[in-house]
Image: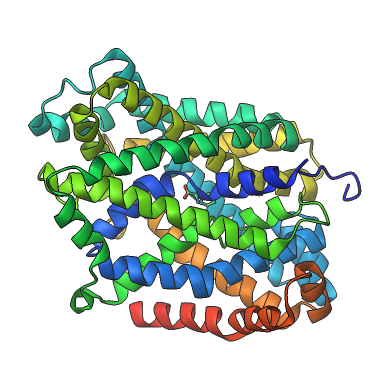
Amino acid sequence: MTENRPHFATRLGVIATTVGSAVGLGNIWRFPYEAGTHGGGAFLMIYILCIAVIGIPVICAEFVMGRASRRNIFGAFRTLAPKGGRYWQLMGVAGIVGSIMILAFYSVVAGWTIEYLMQSLAGTLEEVASTERQAAFDSFTGGWRCVLWTLVILGLNCAIVLGGVRKGIERVSNLLMPLLFVLLITLALNSLLLPGAGEGLKFLFRPDFSTVDSSVVLGALGQAFFSLSLGLGTMMIYASYFSPSTPLLKSAATTAGLDTLVALIAGVIIFPAVFTFGAEPSAGPKLVFEVLPDIFHRMPGGVVWSTVFFLLLLLASLTSTISMSEISVAYFSEQWGISRRKAVAVNTAIALVLGTLCALSFGPLSDFTICGKTVFGLFDYVASNIIMPLGGMLISIFVGWVLRRSVFDMELSPAPRALLCCLAFCLRFIAPGAIAVIFIAYI
Ligand code: PHE
């Protein structure tokens, strides 16, 4: 099973798929609304700090575990831990549960992009007056189309994952990411010309630490993990498809760098518009979907821009959903010994049920709350702010303390020695320590 495991064909394929997993709704939808609810500049600073001292070391740790074991997260702990790692395997279970939870709520938001794409194609998106946008959004998310699009996303996701690693994932990603990047830069330049640009940029880049509390720090940490697809084994499973010559450190740095850049550009697109069109930065998950139509509305040829934008956003979300699915699909097929086809079916079936519940959270189930959160909100919170950071903490402890140092050094070579020591130090002390402190402060 391990020997004839498929490989990504090219270096570009490696970067495109890891960046494809990382870049998605997390950067363009979740980052602006998290930054908006947590006060802007200070959140951004803490977020960047989390990426640098926790995110990059944890990506390297996942890469090392994935390529050294050539297995899914569950099998990786089992192969690499001394004595079969009985307890470490539980970490694998958390990764699988977390990834399915994310797939469920993420598909709902990806479904929103289908709706916006359709409305854009029909020319109705820009027709809605600014003041009625909120009502239009609420009526759509509360209705049956929201559920339908969620199911469509899960169907598309299932079809791509069935295409197999090289054919499906790599081809889609290679084609897409550069195009999305160019479009985002154009939109950012456009936003810089809006009258509220100064205020928007001030909000995003001028930190006000007086408003920072532990929930802001936990939010930034969760966002860093969500955006980099960390702590569940996504980067681990992708690294298990890397060829032995892929330089891990360089790939980790490129992935983190590009991902952060896209989030920043999304911020530069959204916040000038928020202040120009009088939206509330703390509007929550609907923020981006309410502001974007206003941006397109003011642009010459707005229909074309919005159509291309939502199409690319949809595709970017799919390159992320396929990476979440890969975690459990690889697990079901490798650990249970069932065919990939059946594994995809199991994954899709669970996600269909949970995804429907998440979609209904904006309509019929909006009053059904657990700890004050709807199913959608709860899945997002538990997976992003709890399972992912805790997973990241355990992965760093495992690679820092349990994994043989020679394996670590060999996988990360040809990185300079000093850099390796620095990384190992981050994984042993800084990442687990910082995550623990943030949790304790929060509780
Ligand atoms: N990183 C992805 C995004 O920002 C989301 C994701 C989370 C993907 C977890 C895989 C695993 O959109």
Residue 239, x across and y down, in percent? 72, 55
- 91 above or below 107? below
Residue 376 visible from this viewpoint: no
User: Residue at (54%, 43%) from the top-left corner?
Assistant: 320
Residue 374, x across and y down, in percent? 31, 49
- 309 above or below 66? above
Which colouring convention does the figure follow?
rainbow
Q: Nearer the viewer, residue 273 or 437?
A: 273
Residue 68, x across and y down, in percent? 81, 63
Q: Residue furthest right?
A: 3
- 436 above or below 345? below
Q: Nearer the viewer, residue 304 or 407?
A: 304
User: Residue at (62%, 53%) from the top-left corner?
Assistant: 234
User: Residue at (81%, 51%) from the top-left corner?
Assistant: 243
Q: Residue furthest top?
A: 122
Q: Quadrant of residue 31?
A: bottom left
- 309 above or below 214? above
Q: In the image, 253: left or right of 44? A: right
Q: In the image, 88: left or right of 376? A: right
Q: In the image, 83: left or right of 230? A: right
Q: Quadrant of the C terminus?
A: bottom left
Residue 186, x across and y down, in percent? 35, 38
User: Residue at (19%, 74%) from the top-left corner?
Assistant: 211
Q: How many marks?
A: 0
Residue 296 visible from this viewpoint: yes
Q: Nearer the viewer, residue 162 or 342?
A: 162
